[in-house]
Image (spheres, grey):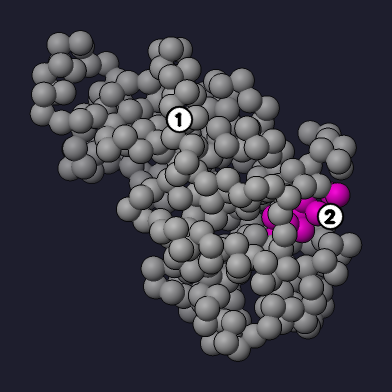
């Protein structure tokens, strides 16, 4: 895909479910460098859709942390929790295309129907509620409120990732019909992210490789809504020193703790060195890294953080 530099628009899309950890900073730094090194814009969206996990004070904290690190953005921040009416509109467009159906499966039924598994251990939905009759739906509706799924075709969807090269998978066997609205009425991440990226003019999505297998379904969903497909770069995950996935709930390498021992240029230097941009982990600002950034320098496999705390 050939875009002129002025058109690149990258984004930060943090989930304010806790304080950011080093892995979040790593993804944010690479997203910012990728957009800025192309002379592009950067926008911020707070992915606070899930009222059970997100708290307003973490939104403010995310913005302070990005600012502390020297990463800036060009828009008035967008809060997903204030945009349900927009997601509703696009949900209805998909409904009108006949793609949405109610799913009455319980958690246990979903677990029981769990083969085959995707690589991340989450079951591919077997589509059992797709072909319910109107009468069956009525009966089930008396017992529980449904979640809403979108019916995917048996299609292979692929793309050229800026970091990892070509990636593709079959929607029906690797992903299955996925949820766009939960039974409590909350619109799902998969819908919100596609709608928001398009409406915010995002042309480049840089994020952790844990989201790689969401991308084919997001590309396909965007196509159903008539959106242009952004470019994608899935960056390797930064693992804890002992090889574990970093988790906000465990407060692993959390910025609050790191800030007590490191300055922002020191942390940026450590990350830039891991990204292959500088030969030693010496202090540096994000702005000074802009001319050094190139995707072919960035490693493709997951990385282990050095001992920092
Ligand atoms: N909000 C997600 C996260 O913080 C990122 C979603 C995305 O980049 O599409 O993990």
Residue receiving disc 2:
37
- Residue 164 appears in the rendering: no
- Residue 140 appears in the rendering: yes
Number of numbered labels in the structure image: 2
Which label number is shown at residue 85? Answer: 1
Residue 8 as seen in the image, left or right of residue 163: right
Task: Please give the name of the residue rendered at 63% of the width and 32% of the height, measured from the top-left corner.
Answer: 198
- What x and y, as percent, mark residue 131? 27, 16
- Where disc 2 sits, the SS reads helix
Task: Please give the name of the residue rendered at 41% of the width and 17% of the height, measured from the top-left corner.
Answer: 95
- Disc 1 residue crowd, few under 14, some 14–19, many 20+, Cα 10 Å: few
Q: Nearer the viewer, mark 1 or mark 2?
A: 1
Residue 87 painted magenta: no
Which label number is shown at residue 297? Answer: none
Of the pair 165 and 104, the residue shown nearer to us: 104
Quadrant housing residue 199:
top right
Which quarter of the image is occupied by the N terminus? top right
Query: Magenta segment, which residues?
Result: 30-39
- What x and y, as percent, mark residue 279? 82, 78
Residue 32 painted magenta: yes
- Where disc 1 sits, the SS reads helix
């Amino acid at each position: 895909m050939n875009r002129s530099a002025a058109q690149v628009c990258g984004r930060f899309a943090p989930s304010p479910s806790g304080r950011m950890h080093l892995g979040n900073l790593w993804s944010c730094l690479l997203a910012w460098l990728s957009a800025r090194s192309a002379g592009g814009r950067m926008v911020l969206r707070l992915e606070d859709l899930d009222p059970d996990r997100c708290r307003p004070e973490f939104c403010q904290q995310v913005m302070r942390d990005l600012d502390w690190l020297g990463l800036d953005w060009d828009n008035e921040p967008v809060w997903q929790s204030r945009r349900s009416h927009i997601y509703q509109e696009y949900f209805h467009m998909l409904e009108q295309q006949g793609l949405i159906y109610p799913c009455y499966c319980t958690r246990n039924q979903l677990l029981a129907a769990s083969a085959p598994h995707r690589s991340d251990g989450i079951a591919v939905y077997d589509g059992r509620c797709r072909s319910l009759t109107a009468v069956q739906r009525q009966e089930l509706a008396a017992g529980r409120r449904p979640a809403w799924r979108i019916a995917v075709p048996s299609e292979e969807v692929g793309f050229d990732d800026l970091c990892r090269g070509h990636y593709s998978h079959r929607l029906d066997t690797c992903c299955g019909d996925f949820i766009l609205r939960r039974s409590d009425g909350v619109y799902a991440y998969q819908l919100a992210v596609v709608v928001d990226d398009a409406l915010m003019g995002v042309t480049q999505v840089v994020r952790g490789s844990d989201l790689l297998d969401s991308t084919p379904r997001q590309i396909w969903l965007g196509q159903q809504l008539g959106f242009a497909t952004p470019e994608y770069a899935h960056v390797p995950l930064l693992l804890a020193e002992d090889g574990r996935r970093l988790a906000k709930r465990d407060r692993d390498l959390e910025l609050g703790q790191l800030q007590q021992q490191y300055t922002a240029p020191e942390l940026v230097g450590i990350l830039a060195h891991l990204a292959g941009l500088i030969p030693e982990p010496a202090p540096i600002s994000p702005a000074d890294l802009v001319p050094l950034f190139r995707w072919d320098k960035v490693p493709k496999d997951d990385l282990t953080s050095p001992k920092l705390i």
